[in-house]
Image (cartoon, helix red, strand yellow):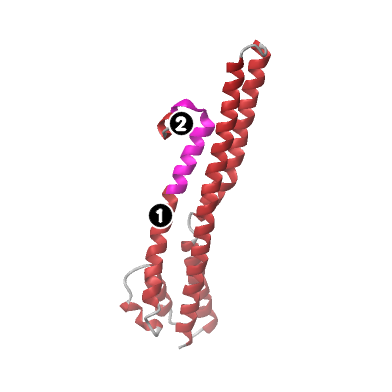
């Protein structure tokens, strides 16, 4: 069964879950691209020995951050340290961008599947109430809807949670590597 057939043959719950899984995949592609770029930038960063060598890095978020820190020449040490902290917070925000969207989809997808389950059960009872137990087709339609909605919600949730955990781990790893190297550069 293709996605187009699922879209045409099923209710709004399945359509919403198809959109949600599409959003997860699009965000995942963006995050993979971002993490590859960040990984390369961190490799370049480990080659320099002072913060003043940021010009030798290729242009990216890390080199721009180092340039901002290096250009913030101020006699007040507390202000300089606050600036470094802000830049680290901004890097963390950059690394974790859109990850909360994937997390939200992972949490809401099973609930959406459960709503579809209730709708399907409602159709079963509605069919039984109006026709009685003589027509099994009405009961089967409702049970099919129950199973598809529930299964789709769980599949979307599992896929989204796997991507969320992978990206959360990679983001934290990049943040720690950058902080470690930055503090080593600032000590010199």
Question: Is 25 rendered above or below residue 19?
Answer: below
Question: Is 12 rendered above or below residue 23?
Answer: above
Q: Is 120 covered by the magenta stretch? A: no
Question: Is 9 rendered above or below residue 161?
Answer: above
Question: Residue farthest to the bottom?
Answer: 188
Q: Main secondary structure of the magenta part?
A: helix
Q: Is residue 129 visible?
A: yes
What is the crowding at mark 2: few (fewer than 14 residues within 10 Å), some, or many (at least 20)? some
Q: Quadrant of the N terminus?
A: top left
What is the crowding at mark 1: few (fewer than 14 residues within 10 Å), some, or many (at least 20)? few
Residue holding disc 1:
30
Q: Is residue 67 visible?
A: no
Name the residue rendered at 57%, 22% in the picture.
Answer: 141
Mark linked to residue 64: none
Q: Nearer the viewer, mark 1 or mark 2?
A: 2
Q: Quadrant of the C terminus?
A: bottom left
Total labels: the figure holds 2
For marks 1 and 2, the one nearer the N-term is 2
Q: How far is the residue under mark 1 from the one under mark 2?
A: 26 Å
- Please state the horizontal and vertical placement of residue 64, each as a whole percent of the image: 38, 71
Q: Is 17 covered by the magenta stretch? A: yes
Residue holding disc 2:
6
Name the residue rendered at 59%, 37% in the picture.
Answer: 112
Q: Which region of the structure is painted magenta?
A: 6-25
Question: Is 171 rendered above or below residue 21?
Answer: below
- Callout 2: SS: helix
């Amino acid at each position: 069964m293709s996605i187009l057939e699922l879209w045409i043959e099923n209710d709004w719950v399945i359509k919403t879950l198809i959109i949600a899984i599409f959003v997860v995949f699009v965000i995942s592609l963006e995050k993979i691209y971002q993490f590859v770029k960040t990984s390369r930038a961190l490799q370049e960063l480990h080659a320099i020995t002072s913060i003043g060598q940021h010009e030798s890095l290729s242009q990216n978020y890390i080199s721009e951050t180092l340039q901002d820190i290096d250009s913030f020449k101020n006699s007040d040490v507390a202000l300089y340290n606050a600036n470094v902290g802000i830049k680290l917070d901004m890097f963390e925000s950059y690394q974790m961008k859109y990850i909360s969207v994937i997390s939200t989809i992972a949490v809401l997808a099973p609930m959406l599947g459960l709503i579809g389950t209730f709708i399907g059960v409602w159709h079963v009872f509605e069919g039984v109430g109006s026709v009685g137990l003589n027509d099994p087709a009405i009961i089967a339609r409702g049970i099919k809807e129950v199973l598809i909605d529930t299964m789709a919600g769980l599949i979307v949730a599992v896929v989204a949670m796997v991507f969320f955990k992978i990206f959360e781990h990679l983001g934290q790893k990049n943040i720690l590597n950058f902080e470690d190297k930055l503090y080593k550069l600032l000590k010199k």
